Amino acid sequence: MRIGYPCMNTGIGCTSARTFRLKSWSEERFLSTVAENLSCLSRILAYNAAHELLFFRVTSDLVPFASHPVNILDWPGIFAEEFAGIGAVVRENGMRVSMHPDQFTLINSPDEGVRERSVAELAYHAAALDAMGLDTTAKVQVHVGGVYGDREAAMERFVERYRTLPGAVGRRLVVENDDRLYTVRDCLALHRACGVPVVFDVFHHECNSSGEDAAGALAACAATWDPLDDGPLMVDYSSQAPGARRGRHAAALDPTHFAAFLAASRPHDFDLMLEVKDKEQSALRARALALAAGDPRVRRGRP
């Protein structure tokens, strides 16, 4: 079990998600921004390696406007050395990385323009992971999308669109249950129809389930992953923010809730993404708690 966090580190003093407005586009600004983002990502991964936080979600803003028509630059080629160096750090330290496009990436949209933009965005994410030289255990994670007034038709569109995705995208794409529209049961139905692996989101399952307990849902999701091609199941973990609207992520790790989740999840192995607002701080606490509990699944450093 590799434990990690998404997108940014709160303590190292840089961000890998620098961007700018489209009206400010210039090749010079683009190149300098990407260079800074890649440099910061390298620093984040170095920190993670030193602290044995071995799972990291790379920000979608790593390459601004990568899928926009304004950008005709060969950014994977221009930054080939930097991407290769990042991939080497990931491999050498037994890490895993993933990416997660924003909520506007909707391959099941009935709007053809939205679908085309979504596929272009997914192609960018896959290209970034390809540029790092990573195998297909490095995944691009999406939600099913909208319901659009007809759940069955929306799910059928997802299956049809998934089957027509470019190979570079399809081999990395995974789908997660969400907190309002699509449950684990829905996602498992998609897997049966087209083979897409299913990420298990613990908090979303607490907010929106079909009645299954978390242990059973996790086990069912784990069975959708091919150990060789996909790697271990990816699990997103967080808990409800006290006193906030239902579905809002907690600002910090809840040790009691986390301990209960670890106990319920045994004996399944998986890689765990801490979607908690204080990022690496909670990831470090989660790892320490799992080790203190004697959980044998926690991975320690280089393989």
Image: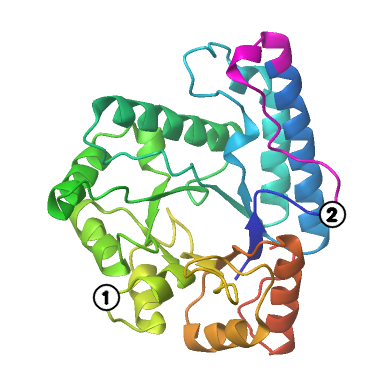
Image quadrant in which the C terminus is located: bottom right
Magenta range is 11-29
Image quadrant in which the N terminus is located: bottom right
Give the residue pinned by disc 1: 210
Give the x, y percent position of residue 163.
23, 40
Q: Residues within 10 Å of mark 2 (few under 14, many from 20)?
A: few
Q: Nearer the viewer, residue 44 or 275?
A: 275
**For residue 290, side relative to residue 169 (left or right):** right
Q: Do the residues labelled 2 and 1 touch (CB within 8 Å)?
A: no
Give the x, y percent position of residue 259.
61, 86
Q: Quadrant of residue 81?
A: top right
Q: Nearer the viewer, residue 256 or 232?
A: 256
Can residue 213 be seen here? Answer: yes
Q: Please tell me which residue is depicted at 70% across the width and 42% down the height of the picture.
A: 88
First in sequence: mark 2 vs mark 1: 2
Give the residue pinned by disc 2: 11
Q: Please tell me which residue is depicted at 60% across the width and 78% down the height of the picture.
A: 297
Q: In which quarter of the image is residue 177?
A: bottom left
Where 289 sits versus 196, above or below? below
Cα separation, mark 2 vs mark 1, equals 39 Å
Q: Is residue 183 magenta?
A: no
Give the x, y percent position of residue 270.
52, 70
Residue type for callout 2 = Gly
